Structures are given as C-alpha cells and as structure tokens.
Image (spheres, helix red, strand yellow):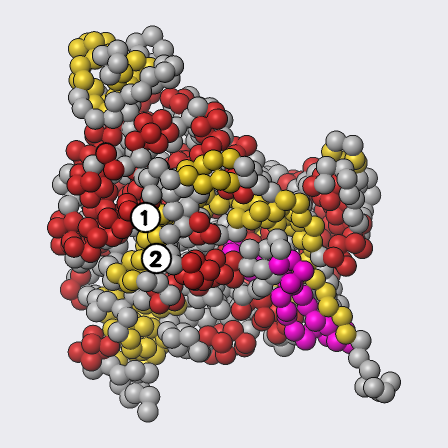
C-alpha cells in the first residue's frame, strides 16, 4: 500500500440510546477522521443481553452526523410572527449572542421570581421519549437542578400516550415502571398488543428468538398482525379496546372453573391481600385496637390481625366477626359488631363469576373456546409448585407471563388491563419470580438504581407508597405544574419523573379553555420554554390545534438537530453535538426498561468518534456556559458533585474526585472526574479508571446476581404482601380526592373518579369513544372504523425520520408506506393497494397510501409511527398519514391517571384519480 492510499482507520467504542430499549453497545468505524460504519461491539458479548449488537436505528447515526440539513450554528428568529405559514427568518448568530440572550432572559425570570402569580414555574422544559434525551444532554440535569423549579408538565406525548398506566400501577403493585416477561426462563406468554419485536431492541429480539428455539409459545392478542404477532405462535384478532373483557374472562376461567385447588394457594395466602376480610361497605374489617386488617384463622375459629404469628388464614368462605372497625376516606371510622367478613379472594371469585368466556366473546369477538383454551394453557404452563436454583437460592419457577402494549395499558380500560395482568400473575404465583412477570426498572419510587431498596414496610402489610396527599390538610389545591399532577393524580407521586407522567394533555388543553367549574388559577404560559429531542407538534394528539398553542409561547429555545415542526416556532436554535460527536457516561445493566435486565451493572462511555460538524457544541459545554453566565456556576458544580449528571456522586467512601465548585471546568475534566468516581464506586475501591481508559475500553461492569431480577424474595424477607387483588386503598383515596375536589366545587374530574374501585368492573370502553363522538355533535355511524397506531423499529421514538437510511429500510417492511387496512374492507370501499386515501375523523383529515393486508380486522386501520411532517427535512416529503392529526385531545377520553390512548374512530375514502398503476 502506498502513502497516497494509506488510511488511518480507527474503531471507537460508544453506545446507542435512541429509545428506551437501550443502551446498546456499538463501535464506530472512522477512516481518516470520517465516520463510515456502525458495528456491533462484541467485546460486550459476555455482559450485554443482545451480545453486543445494535438495532437498525444505530446504523443510521453516520447519516445523522453528516445530514446536510443539520443546524450547524446558533440561529435566531427574525420574524416576530409565529405561525405555520410564517417564515421564521432564522439567521445565524454567534454562540456568545445566543447564550447571552438566554442568560438575560433567565436573569429576568429570577428578578421577577421563579414562579408566577398562578404559582407556576416561569421556566418550562420538554424532553422526549422515556428519559432517553438525558443520555445525550451531558450535565444539563445539573444546570436544571441548580436553577430551581422547572415545569415539565407540557411533555410531548410520551407520558400520556406511552404505557402510562403500567408505569403508575406497576410501581404501586410491584415497583415496576415497565413490565416484561422473564423471557430467558419463560414457557408461555400472552402478549396483548405488546409489539416487543419492534420496540424492544436487539435485547428483546434476541431473547424471544432464543425462547422460540427453546420451544416457548407466545400468543399475540391484538387487532392487527404486528411484527411481533408475525413471530408468535398464534394471533388472536381482538376488537379494539376490549382487552379488559378478554382478560376478565381469563381470570374467570382460573378462579371459577379451575378453582383454588389448581392455583398457587401459598402465594395467594402469604404474599397477597387475598385473605383480608372485607366488610359489607367494601372496606377492610380491622382490629378495633390496632386497625390492622383482619383475616380468618380457621384453627382458632376467629378473626385475627393479618400479621398474627403462625396463622394460616382462610381464602374462601364467609365468616362472622364479633367486633371490627372500618376506616374510610378522611379517616372516617365505623365500629361494627357481629359483622360478616369475606376474604378478598372470595370477593374476587364472586366478582368474576359473571365474566364468562361466552360473555367476553360477545364483546371482544374472540371465541369462548379460544379464551378457555388460552386460560388452560396458561395454567398448565405455570407449573404451580415447581422450583429453580438461582444464584444458590431455591426460588419458585412459574414460567408464564402476560404482557401489555401501548393503547392497551393507557387510556380508559388500562387500569382494568393492568390490574387483570397482575392478578393473573398472582393467581399462579408468577409475579416477580423466575419465568414470570417482572418489573424491569423503577422511576417513581427511589432509589432508581435498585428497586429492591425502594421496598419498605407501609400500612396494612403492604409496601410504603409515596402518593400525592389527598387529606384536607395536605392536598395540593393550587397546582404547582400546568398539568396539575399533584392535585389530580395521587398515584403518580411527586418524584422527578412525576410531572411528565401527569395528565400532560391538560397542560395544552387548558391553555385554550378550562372547564366551567375549574376553580383553580388558570394555567399561564411559561416565560421560557426549553425543548430537546422532542417534537410535540407531531407526537401529541390534535396536532393542528397544538401547533397554534406552541405559536403563542413567548420565548422558546430549542436544542436543534434539524428544523422540525416544533422548533419552527422557536426563538433560538442551538446546535448540539450529536451521538457521534460528544462526550457522556451513563449507567448500564441492572434492571432497566423493557427487557434490559442484565446479570451485570456498570457504566458505558459515549465519546466523540469524529469532530463536531460546524459550530455544534458538546451539551456539557453548553450547560457549563449557561451556569456561568447566569451566576449559577457554584450550585451547578455542586450538583455535578452530588451526581446530578446521572452516574455517580464524585465523593464516596474512601475516594473524593469532587470538582472545585468555584471554577469553570472543561468538558473532559468533568467527565474524567465522573469516570474515576464511577469505576471506584463500582469496584468498591479496587479499580479507578480515568477518561483515557474509558475512551479505549468503552465500558466497565461488575457482576450482578440474577436473583435481583425478582422482587418476591425481598417482600418475603420483609414480611410484606402485594396489594392485590382487592384495591381498598385506591377506593379510599378516590373517595378522598373526590371530597377535596367537591369542597372546591369542582366536578369536571368526576368521570375520572369512577376508576377508583376495589375490584374493577367492565364498562363499555369502546363505547366511550362512540359517546365522545356524539357529545362532539358527530354521528358514530359516519366514522365506522377504528384507527390505531403501531410501532416501528426503524422510526421508534420519532428521532430518525430525517435519516434517509431509515426510510430505505422501512420500505422493506409491510405497512411503512401508508395506512394498513383489511383487503376485504378495501374491496368493499373501492380502494386498491397503493391508492391515495383520506382518513377523516370528526376533527380533521390525514392523507396517505392504502396498504392492503389480510392480517388485520375488517373494522380496523393501522398507521405506523408519527408522521404528517411539514417542516422536518426528508420526512416532509414522505406523504405519510398520522393518527395524531385526527385524534382529539379530550378530557372525556382521559382516564384517572391522566392518560389517553392512540385510537380514534374514522372514515376512509379513496381520493379520485389516485390509483397507483
């Protein structure tokens, strides 16, 4: 090889965390300073569940880096008018001008006060999908911590539209922000709308492929045949939004037809609320002296407190209790004498008796024989009584699970589905044990790194919960955020993640109109809105109206990659160095989102594989400059020292790598200190690795016991129970919240209060959407089809739409060209494959091509991803339709947790002259 042709080739270890299914380890191939390829990092094969491989999104990062449409220098808006048809007039400016402009605005906010006259923060921020922007924003979290109150209420759809109820109820029942099957040990999965082969990344794909080789069965229950359904053993085409009926019938078969003798009696008796006695008023019967819930002791022939040593309480029957008390909302106590008490399990059996498979068939369009067979297969594969050795301990083996997907576990019907899924696990003892249903991370409770450490004894033998208060003294009657999460949603709590999981659509809706009896300060616009890796103008509902609201924000700062539909209205665009150009360390391993539960934990470095394009700057440099220019340098540095960068405190037992709080530190100095602290902490002082070491090796992990995947042994050690199947506490909290709202003459949340029940009842969930049409002045018969959205590995999280490679790959996957519809329905409507069609709801229309298939119900349409782009380069030329354009933001369609669902009633018609030859 001659000197003229010699090349300088390097392999740079890094990570991809473009969706919550990450992080995935990767290697960037760089030739003569230019990134040319993304490759797996097989050095991580022994610790990474996907054996060091990445999904398709990572392979687009080279094109992302060199995208000709990138914002490569700070830009300011010159047109004061904001509107979709107004040219922003962006012109380039210097970093000094951009940062000084922001600093001056922030100084003005501090001078006026951090909160406005309505008690709301004057600074708001929206960051995108599932916390993943934090894996790219360097030390910005430390700046936010130094600043003070910031309103994250607006969100970008990722809270209310994600697996929202699973987050809230999962953390309540078993510290599970996300829930997955223990796929490596599972034999049988009922997957209800869970499209994990598209959204679970290479970790989930690898595990499920291995499981299929091993012989496991996955039953996919959903209205259309998704990617995951195509890889399943069986597809069950269920009517949209009738999933609770299907699941209630499964429970009926187990408890009413098979009976307690075939279920996991010890688990139900010792690890759940099943033996707690319920009184005639629906509340637990409690001991008159201690107020502890009572159980029936068959040996003694009397009711005793649940924690009486040696008691083996009854699960079936009805019993006379000589004396008891009940405790209702606002601590209202009632003394009872010679009262009948019924174990919660018996209450469950009697409650589910009416929900037969024959009943469900008429609602969800799944044959009763199919429902009964699936329930039987689930019970048979549960192997009740089996055990397995894990890390030297003998644990129950229950290799069955039920998993739920988006729009099943958010919006109306989601509470019932999440409850039913978790009850199905408890009935066979498959909750938080090998093979069963697992929580894979914790976010609403603390500490986030180890959900076992969040388990502490609370009232009634259950885990302690950090609810937003509903008692008269402490209820937050004056919202502290624009979505009122602390006021309206007790179960969401008030952690760092809670705001984004409140009813974020209310923050947008109430900028336009509030209910007549709102009786709270009207939400204001923030003085400054920061936005990063988020495009709510595309990713929320009723996007045409939302765009109009975004245009009214007084000052918006976007950390921008390209122009998009939201930052089109920004006042400043700041070009941050992207995935292959910047420096950051994050935690990996342990138990994370989706199926990212590992047998190792540690840290991984993302490093500049190439020099930043143009004037793009590392986010840590941007954050440090903002802190310096706003006079917050010292609290900013102290926040980094505390670990606000998300990795590790810089000082611990036997080590101190703290930064001098009074000095301005460069990017490498900051991350070098974090590298040293993280490696020292992980190795318990045995190893200390600096930034140079991590740039060479990429990651550092230590072993983690597989036993930490499972929460049940921890509850058993602490003598605690799961708060299932009977939701007495939620019943009381709902009544208490109702008292508070009604004391303030507010009834606009009353429909949501109906969800607070001890045992969920079937209500006509699809009918809510039909009634919403009627209430809006439309006729349901004019909109006969259900429109759903589905996930795509190529476009998952929406950050890859301007990358041409993603489009090229997506065109090889069925459905990515338009709206999927049943071929017979299309024939009836005169629509051919490839025809351009209009999909219209009562609020508007979206347009695209028809993609005909037989793997979809005749009453259903499906659109992949989030499109209808009109500003984002490349994507605006796709001509792809979007559910978000035609789905309304509606208080009527908002459930008690504040979430809604990606589903809307529509009509479809062929546009004249549109047939594709």
- Dot 2 alpha-carbon crowd within 10 angstroms: few under 14, some 14 to 19, many 20 or more: many
Residue holding disc 2: 217
> In the picture shown, does residue 832 fall above or below 43?
below
Residues drawn in magenta: 18-45
Q: Residue at x 34, y 79 (%)?
A: 849
Q: Secondary structure at mark 1?
A: helix
Question: Nearer the N terminus, badge 2 or badge 1?
Answer: 2
Residue holding disc 1: 381
Residue 401 is marked as: none
Question: Could you tell me if the residues under marks 2 and 1 are in contact, i.e. CB atoms within 8 Å?
Answer: yes
Q: Is residue 202 magenta?
A: no
Residue 409: give x, y in percent of width and height. Answer: 35, 49
> In the picture shown, does residue 852 fall above or below 526?
below
Q: Is residue 20 magenta?
A: yes
Residue 422: give x, y in percent of width and height. Answer: 34, 41
Q: Is residue 595 left or right of residue 349?
A: right
> In the picture shown, does residue 580 fall above or below 139?
below
Residue 610: give x, y in percent of width and height. Answer: 74, 68
Q: Is residue 675 visible?
A: yes
Q: Residue at x 61, y 74 (%)?
A: 63
Q: Is residue 200 left or right of residue 766?
A: right
Q: Give the CA separation, mark 2 to mark 1.
A: 10 Å
Indicate the quadrant where residue 851 lies: bottom left
């Amino acid at each position: 090889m001659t000197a003229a042709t010699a090349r300088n080739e390097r392999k740079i270890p890094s990570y991809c965390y473009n969706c919550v299914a990450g992080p995935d380890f990767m290697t960037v191939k760089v030739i003569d300073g230019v990134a040319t390829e993304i490759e797996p990092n097989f050095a991580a094969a022994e610790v990474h569940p996907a054996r060091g491989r990445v999904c398709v999104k990572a392979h687009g990062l080279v094109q992302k880096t060199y995208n000709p449409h990138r914002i490569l220098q700070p830009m300011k808006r010159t047109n004061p008018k904001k509107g979709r048809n107004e040219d922003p007039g962006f012109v380039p400016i210097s970093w000094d001008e951009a940062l000084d402009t922001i600093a001056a605005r922030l100084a003005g906010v501090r001078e006026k006060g951090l909160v406005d006259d309505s008690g709301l923060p004057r600074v708001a921020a929206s960051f995108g999908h599932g916390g993943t922007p934090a894996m790219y924003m360097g030390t910005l979290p430390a700046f936010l911590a130094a600043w003070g109150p910031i309103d994250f209420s607006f969100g970008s759809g990722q809270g209310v539209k994600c697996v929202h109820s699973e987050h809230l109820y999962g953390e309540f029942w078993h510290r599970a922000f996300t829930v997955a099957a223990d796929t490596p040990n599972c034999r049988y999965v009922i997957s209800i709308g869970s499209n994990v082969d598209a959204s679970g990344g290479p970790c989930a794909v690898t595990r499920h492929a291995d499981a299929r080789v091993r012989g496991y069965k996955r039953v996919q229950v959903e209205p259309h045949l998704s990617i995951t359904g195509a890889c399943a053993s069986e597809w069950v085409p269920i009517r949209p939004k009738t999933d609770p009926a299907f699941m209630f019938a499964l429970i009926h078969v187990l408890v009413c037809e098979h009976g307690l003798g075939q279920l996991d009696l010890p688990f139900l008796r010792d690890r759940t609320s099943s033996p707690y006695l319920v009184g005639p008023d629906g509340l637990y019967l409690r001991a008159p002296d201690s107020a502890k819930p009572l159980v029936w002791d068959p040996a003694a022939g009397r009711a005793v407190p649940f924690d009486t040593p040696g008691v083996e309480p009854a699960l079936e029957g009805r019993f006379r209790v000589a004396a008891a008390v009940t405790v209702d909302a606002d601590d209202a106590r009632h003394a009872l004498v010679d009262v009948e008490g019924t174990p919660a399990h018996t209450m469950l059996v009697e409650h589910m008796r009416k929900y037969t498979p024959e009943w469900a068939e008429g609602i969800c369009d799944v044959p009763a024989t199919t429902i009964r067979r699936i329930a039987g297969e689930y019970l048979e594969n549960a192997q009740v009584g089996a055990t397995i050795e894990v890390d030297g301990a003998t644990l129950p083996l229950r290799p069955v699970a039920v998993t739920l997907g988006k729009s099943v576990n958010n919006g109306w019907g989601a509470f019932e589905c999440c409850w039913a899924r978790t009850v199905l696990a408890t009935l066979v003892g498959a909750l938080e044990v090998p093979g069963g249903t697992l929580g894979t991370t914790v976010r609403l409770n603390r500490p986030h790194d180890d959900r076992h450490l969040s388990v502490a004894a609370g009232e009634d033998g259950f885990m302690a919960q950090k609810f937003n208060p509903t008692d008269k003294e402490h209820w937050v009657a004056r919202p502290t955020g624009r979505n009122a999460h602390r006021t309206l949603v007790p179960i969401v709590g008030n952690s760092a993640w809670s705001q984004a999981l409140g009813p974020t659509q209310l923050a947008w809706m109430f900028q336009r109109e509030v209910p007549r009896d709102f009786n709270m300060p009207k939400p204001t616009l923030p003085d400054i809105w920061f936005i990063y890796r988020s495009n709510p103008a595309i990713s929320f509902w009723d996007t045409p109206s939302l765009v109009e609201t975004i245009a009214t924000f007084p000052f918006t700062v976007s950390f921008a990659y390209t122009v998009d539909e939201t930052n089109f209205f920004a006042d400043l665009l700041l070009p941050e160095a992207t995935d292959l150009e910047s420096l950051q360390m994050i935690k990996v391993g342990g138990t994370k989102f989706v199926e990212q539960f590992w047998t190792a934990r540690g840290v991984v470095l993302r490093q500049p594989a190439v020099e930043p394009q143009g004037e793009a700057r590392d986010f840590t440099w941007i954050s440090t400059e903002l802190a310096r220019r706003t006079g917050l340098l010292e609290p900013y540095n102290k926040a980094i020292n505390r670990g606000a960068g998300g990795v590790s405190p810089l000082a611990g037992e036997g080590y101190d790598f703290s930064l001098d709080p009074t000095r301005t530190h460069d990017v490498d100095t900051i991350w070098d200190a974090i590298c040293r602290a993280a490696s020292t902490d992980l190795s318990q002082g045995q190893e200390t690795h600096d930034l140079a070491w991590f740039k060479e090796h990429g990651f550092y992990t230590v072993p983690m016991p597989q036993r930490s995947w499972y929460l049940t042994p921890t509850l058993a050690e602490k003598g605690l129970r799961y708060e299932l199947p009977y939701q007495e506490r939620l019943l009381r909290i709902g009544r208490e919240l109702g008292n508070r709202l009604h004391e303030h003459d507010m009834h606009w949340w009353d429909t949501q209060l109906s969800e607070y029940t001890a045992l969920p009842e079937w209500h006509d969930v699809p009918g809510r959407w039909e009634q919403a049409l009627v209430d809006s002045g439309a006729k349901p018969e004019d909109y006969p089809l259900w429109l759903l959205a589905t996930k795509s590995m190529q476009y998952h999280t929406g950050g890859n739409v301007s990358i041409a490679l993603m489009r090229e790959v997506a065109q090889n996957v069925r459905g990515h060209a338009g709206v999927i519809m049943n071929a017979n329905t299309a024939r009836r409507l005169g629509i051919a494959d490839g025809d351009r069609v209009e999909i219209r709801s009562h609020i508007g229309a979206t347009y695209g091509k028809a993609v005909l298939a037989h793997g979809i119900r005749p009453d259903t349409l499906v659109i992949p991803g989030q499109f209808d782009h009109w500003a984002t380069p490349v994507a605006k030329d796709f001509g792809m339709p979007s559910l978000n354009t035609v789905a309304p933001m509606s208080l009527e369609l908002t459930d008690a947790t504040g979430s809604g669902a990606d589903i809307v009633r529509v009509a479809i018609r062929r546009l004249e002259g549109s047939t594709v030859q």
